[in-house]
Image: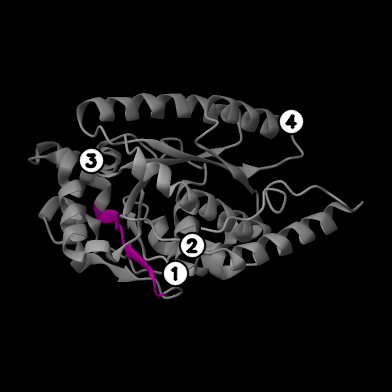
Amino acid sequence: MTMPREDSFAGFESSSDSPIADEIIRTVRGRREFDEAVLTPPAQTRVVAVANQKGGVGKTTSAVNLAAALATKGARVLVVDLDPQGNASTALGVDHHSGTPSVYEALLEGQPLRQLISVSPDIDTLFCVPATIDLAGADIELVSVMRREFRLHDSLNGLLEDDGPGFDYVFIDCPPSLGLLTLNALVVASEVLIPIQCEYYALEGLTQLRSTIGMVRQHLNPRLDISSILLTMYDQRTNLAREVAAEVRAHFPEQTLQTTVPRSVRVSEAPSHATTVITHDGASPGAVAYMHAALEFAAKSERVEEDPA
């Protein structure tokens, strides 16, 4: 895969006296390099749990925009919305009103996942298994179900075995908690992507999530690995954001992506148009940041395949 130069988007140095001009130059250059990059599909489907038990860190936003960016490069991407709020379904333009066949039917009733997949209207290689409000009680309902931690594992593996290499990536958007729904995602995934907002409390949440992932690896899924950490809502003007970013990189130098996602009005408003920022405004700084984060994430494919544990 052809990756953008390190001095282009994430590391572009200012050559102008105007911050606005700098941002425009960096964004235009970054979009051009994304368009020119060649994406090599992974040898096998990468199943990724996008998780952080702390809400408001850009978890769903990151899941859908990374998925959309990869899909625009020709990858076949499935997003499994495991959050009862259904925000990923909204962003992908997929119907998820109460009563719509959803991931709930797969988890609680054993309905084949293939029957629940919808195509995003914006990108024909982007697919979604929606979540409805019915999922709100699933954590309690799953308690008495046989193989309660493996319901999504059995369902998704059944789909992938039938469909073979049909999907290059599966992103599972977890709820902002560490209940049975998130546990189901961690059991079936081979890797975890953790979005972290650049603020102090995010570091405390990361410690708790690492502990949970360690227990899942020990008892349920030894393949599970934290492959990527994405810094979101980054404001380089503040000391706090820079300090948090530096601390995360110091503790997780291999996992933390070089690309940071800035605070962006375009990113925030895209879901209100039932779309991702990639299709809402693909020339905006937020969209270009997610595009480059997607390229970085895709480049981790070889390492993940060689050392899944």
Q: Is residue 200 left or right of residue 80?
A: right
Q: Nearer the viewer, mark 3 or mark 1?
A: 1
Q: Going from the N terminus, do you reach mark 3 or mark 1 first? A: 1
Helix, strand or loop for disc 1: loop
Residue 139: image tag: 3
Q: Is residue 168 above or below residue 222?
A: below
Does residue 83 appear in the picture of this structure?
no
Q: In the image, what residue type sits under mark 1? A: Gly
Label 2–label 3 contact, CB within 8 A: no
Magenta stretch?
A: 124-134
Identify which residue is drawn at 61% across, 36% down: 198
Query: What quarter of the picture does the C terminus occupy?
Result: top left
Q: Is residue 86 left or right of residue 289?
A: left
Mark 4 crowd level (few <14, some 14–19, many ≥20, 10 Å Cα): few
Q: Going from the N terminus, do you reach mark 4 or mark 1 first? A: 1
Helix, strand or loop for disc 3: helix
Identify which residue is drawn at 61% across, 67% down: 36
Residue 231 on image: x %, y %: 57, 41
Residue behind mark 1: 74
Residue behind mark 2: 39
Q: Marks 3 and 1, how far apart in space?
A: 35 Å
Residue 272: image tag: none
